[in-house]
Image (cartoon, helix red, strand yellow):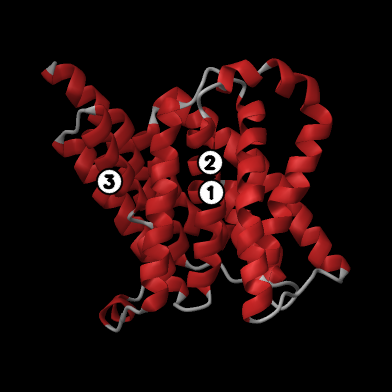
Amino acid sequence: MLGWAGNTIAGRMSTGEMSPMVVVFLRWFIISIFLILFLNKKLITSSNLIHGKFLWLCLMGSLGLTGFNALFYIAAQNTTAINLGIIQGIMPAVILLGSVILFKENVNATKIMGLIIAFLGVIVVVSQGDYEKLILLSFNYGDVVMLCACFFYSGFTLGLKNKPLIDPIVLMTYFSLSALIFSIPLLITEHYLGGIQLPLTRTAWITILYIAFVPSFLAQVFFIRGVELVGASKAGLFINFLPIFAAILGVLLLGEKLYIYHLISLFIVLFGVYLFMILGDNEKKISG
């Protein structure tokens, strides 16, 4: 989650340095080339493990990675940070609902309470502890786009249930290639609609390299492994830490101020995660 939170900081730094679809294309181009060069033998030997998974790889790369990132950048240009944070905060609930419908996951009152409390922690940080900002909320086109992005990545998370028995790094290589291929039409579309802005400064290239290697690669690999270990719904719940970690990184890297609501939201989300993952499972064992 820290890697993805850093993506928020990198996104701020890339504003005015390069256009959104250039970021989407370059992040997958750079990491795809890097992984192919270092994992070419593993890719060849593991090709039989992904036999029959071509459509699955296309969907995971196009919708879950390229689709989510593209829609997120579009939404960020058309709505407020508060709205983005709140809508992204519903992603764990979507993942849990999908787990119940598709995989018959057991849900109890404690888990639902933990989910709600963790979401309230997100509300605290994105509203900056000011309830009046919530009263004045209005929703627009960008919010619909962000909602679609959340469904895309929720589908990606749930889709990991069907992943082949393959090294997460090798699997991420296939995902990156799929994401790269499907980012090309978006880059072409951006060019014809308003023109593209290439990274021409040192800051731009440092930013895109960070985005490629940390949020796009390392954070994704860790998340894939996390889903494998604890399941989609539990791993998805940690998404609620994103706005909190992003705020903390903003304090450390950008010199932004740390407020009491940052700490309050952190403790609320931690308590929600504790209810969901520890007490929720214990309740299931007791009732079982």
The crowd level at tag 2 (other Cα within 10 Å; few <14, some 14-19, many 20+) is some
On the question of residue 52 being in view, the answer is: yes
Marks 2 and 1, how far apart in space? 6 Å
Observer-nearest residue: 123 or 90? 90
Q: Which residue is mark 2?
A: 58
Q: Under tag 1, what secondary structure?
A: helix
In the rendered image, residue 172, in percent from the top left (x then y), is placed at 63, 34
Marks 3 and 2, how far apart in space? 31 Å
Q: Quadrant of residue 123?
A: bottom left
Residue at 28% from the left image edge and 40% from the top image edge: 98
Residue at 55% from the left image edge and 67% from the top image edge: 73
**In the image, is 119 to the left or to the right of 198?**
left
Q: Under tag 2, what secondary structure?
A: helix
On the question of residue 126 being in view, the answer is: no
Marks 3 and 1, how far apart in space? 28 Å
The crowd level at tag 1 (other Cα within 10 Å; few <14, some 14-19, many 20+) is many
User: In front: mark 3 or mark 2?
Assistant: 2
In the rendered image, residue 16, in percent from the top left (x then y), is placed at 71, 78
In the rendered image, residue 128, in percent from the top left (x then y), is placed at 42, 72
Say the numbered circle drawn on residue 62: 1
Amino acid at dot 1: Ser
Amino acid at dot 2: Cys
The crowd level at tag 3 (other Cα within 10 Å; few <14, some 14-19, many 20+) is many
In the rendered image, residue 145, in percent from the top left (x then y), is placed at 41, 68
Q: Which residue is mark 3?
A: 115
Whether the residues at callouts 2 and 1 have beta carbons within 8 Å, the answer is: yes
Amino acid at dot 3: Leu
Q: Quadrant of residue 219?
A: top right
**Where is 246 relative to 172, above or below?**
below
